[in-house]
Image (spheres, rainbow, N blue to C red):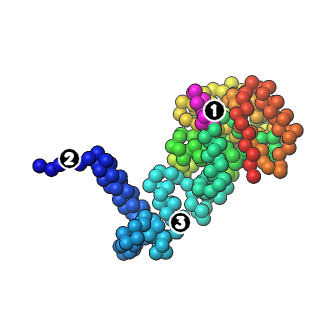
Amino acid sequence: MNAPIPSASQAGIAETAAAIRAEANIGKLLQEAGKLQPHDLERVLKLQQDENLRFGEAAQRLGLVTEADIREALSQQFEYPYVPVGEPGFGLRLAAASAPYGKEAEALRSVRAELLLRWFKDGRKTLAVGSARADEGASLLAANLAVLFAQMGQRVLLIDADMRTARQQDIFTLDKGMGLSDILAGRVPSVQVRTVKPFQTLSILPAGSPPPNPAELLARPAFGALLAGLESSYDVILVDTTPSQIAADFQLVAARVGGMLIATRRNVGRLSPLVELKDKIVMTGAQIVGAVVLD
């Protein structure tokens, strides 16, 4: 009769088996990506066994793959989407998309964590992002945060409510088409969002056709009804707004949403416009959720 295996030993066996499966998956992913050939696997496995290395470390030491190749394989294995450096598209504009392991992305994760603790709780789902000036990075901040929330597996919608100087369609390299303005003006029968690859849970609602009356459109009850309806389909909704020095549209958004995150840029933002922005947000009854100083 065989003796029972102690629970600690069982746990060790399970961990070892999981590690073996993980290493095998990385090898398979690298092979499918064309980074490794079948005969390379034998060399990697031999070095891995001889020197007790991880599969990726062994493959790198042999000069068969780069660190970027390993990171891309790991991102697939752990379902952590990002845009590898060098690939065409929007990734170069967004640290969270193209350099998720860098200092800037890590700092933005701290902002995400603060928002989860201070705002996206107790049923809140929607937050506005704004700035005093157009060159302070609010649109890029909103886009980066949208990517970061999507990397968590959250269903994210990024709305470009800046119908005067729309940025999100350029940041994500989207074709021009219908968007928020067209919905609020009743020009389209339903909401038309764009999905963003490789972020399967991230959608964008562009600003749409440039209207002559953005403030009036945002003041319509249809805007509030639209936000309320979208909250049933998304976990996080971020609303990019017009800078306060351009127009007062941001106040209409803040009043609807209830909270705003302020972006300012080091050596660009000035105290007086920021104080004025703060006062105008408070005047709407919305909360100032925080301020992010960008480099």
Residue type for callout 2:
Pro
Residue type for callout 3:
Glu
Mark drawn on residue 278? none
Report which quarter residue 17 is drawn in: bottom left
Mark drawn on residue 67? 3
Q: Is residue 280 visible?
A: yes
| Magenta stretch, overall SS | loop
Name the outermost residue toward the right.
272
Name the outermost residue toward the left.
1
- Is 1 contained in the magenta span? no
Q: Is residue 145 visible?
A: no
Instruction: Please report whichever mark, 3 or 2, sits nearer to the chain's N-terminal start.
Output: 2
Q: Is residue 275 left or right of residue 119?
A: right
Distance from disc 3 to disc 2, alpha carbons, whole Å, reads: 43 Å
**Which residues make up the magenta segment?**
115-124
Distance from disc 2 to disc 1, alpha carbons, whole Å, reads: 51 Å
Q: Which residue is mark 2?
A: 4
**Foreground label between 3 and 2:** 2
- x then y, percent, for residue 29: 42, 62
**Foreground label between 2 and 1:** 2
Instruction: Please report whichever mark, 3 or 1, sits nearer to the chain's N-terminal start.
Output: 3
Give SS at disc 2: loop
Q: In this orientation, which residue lies closer to the viewer: 10 or 275?
A: 10
Mark drawn on residue 119? 1
- x then y, percent, for residue 148: 59, 46
Residue type for callout 1:
Trp
- x then y, percent, for residue 143: 65, 46
Q: Residue at x 71, y 45 (%)?
A: 139
